[in-house]
Amino acid sequence: MRADSDGGVGTIAAADADARAATWQRVLAEAITDPAELWRVLALDPALLPSALSATRAFALRVPRGFVALMERGNPRDPLLLQVLPQAAELLAVSGFSADPLAEADCQAAPGLLTKYRGRALLVVHGACAVHCRYCFRRHYPYESLPRGPRWWAAALAAIAADPDCHELILSGGDPLLVPDAQLAELIADAAAIAHLARLRVHTRLPVVLPERIGEELCRLLARSRLRCVVVLHANHPRELSPAVAAACARLRAAGCLLLNQSVLLAGVNDDPAVLAALSERLAELGVVPYYLHALDRVAGAAHFLVDDARARAIHRELSAMLPGWLVPRLVREVPGAASKLPL
Ligand SMILES: *Cc1c(COP(=O)(O)O)cnc(C)c1O
Ligand code: SF4
């Protein structure tokens, strides 16, 4: 075969990859942020719009169009929509729900570096997210007060370098994959230079809500690191796992990443053993291991998502009876001051 006939196929593949690299920032920039537009696109009842507008004054609407495309038109109870839908209920003060339920303000070893648990350190590398999840425990996080960029990571990496007990660096946020590839490459290289670090874990919602982000360059830099790369996705409902998401997962697995998923147990979204079982089955198809099912953090504005502990345990018990053990996520809660996330 002539070299150039083979080269044609390679050129098409490379052009595809380039298009992906050029588009993720555009897809991100084109996310829906205006409730009126979301209402139009999904043909929702205009009577519900004022409630959404009042809630967005405290926490803006933000949802990529690809995620909206997975929602059912005309259904205000759609489980994907409910995760991003601003509602007046968020504005009610509910006792037991506060701005910093995890007391994270108390455990920063360096700016943006949380060292709550032994052996691993969590670095908030980016303040923003591609999607605004209404239940998010970081919805009141003072991201603006954090310094940004590689110079700031230097202090966190120095703190990790000084702690020989730390074997895993967790990149979190916000969404750490909103950081451009060139800066991520620098951060990962600096982390890999710390001899006692063995693993790099990335907690991200982007493979699910913006699968275009999982491009060639990102996969290359994860694949070539000496660190063992673990990517923890965040999907709550099986319908989030579209063919485009499956393809993004396949690219990450081809890059040698171990894929895990964490979900939050959310009233109206996935508080049903059949839905959670379908989620686990779909994750298995994508080569993703269900890791955690989190009880909701009691953050102000999220009380309408609460599933009480007794129901959470009953749902989890039923789920356990439906699936192989490795497809049952651990039902946990985060308790300030505890040495790990605690089983419910
Ligand atoms: C959740 C969390 C971790 C990771 O905990 P694992 O149980 O290892 O998944 C690490 N650091 C912080 C601050 C966390 O909140
Ligand atoms: S992507 Fe994660 S950090 Fe961002 S709003 Fe959603 S739950 Fe919160």
Image (tube, rainbow, N blue to C red):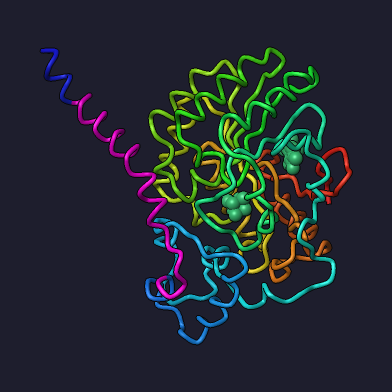
Residue visible at 57% across and 80% down in the picture: 51
Task: Say left or right for 224 vs 304.
Answer: left
Task: Say left or right for 43 vs 320.
Answer: left
Report the magenta stretch's main SS.
helix
In this orientation, which residue lies closer to the viewer: 132 or 322? 132
Quarter-of-image position of residue 155 = top right
Quarter-of-image position of residue 52 = bottom right
Residue visible at 69% across and 19% down in the picture: 197
Quadrant showing the N terminus: top left
Q: Which residues are magenta?
A: 9-37
- The x, y position of residue 189, in whole percent, is 55, 19
- The x, y position of residue 327, in whole percent, is 65, 42
Residue visible at 67% across and 41% down in the picture: 291
- The x, y position of residue 157, in whole percent, is 68, 25
Whether residue 319 appears in magenta in the rendering, the answer is no
Residue visible at 60% across and 38% down in the picture: 125
Quarter-of-image position of residue 325 = top right
User: Is 238 drawn above or below residue 94 in the view shown?
Assistant: above
User: Is 6 drawn above or below residue 60 in the view shown?
Assistant: above
Task: Say left or right for 116 vs 134.
Answer: right
- The x, y position of residue 140, in whole percent, is 69, 58
User: Is 6 drawn above or below residue 133 in the view shown?
Assistant: above
In this orientation, which residue lies closer to the viewer: 128 or 102? 128
User: Is 317 drawn above or below residue 81 in the view shown?
Assistant: above
Specify whether residue 277 is in view. Answer: no
Specify whether residue 70 is in view. Answer: yes
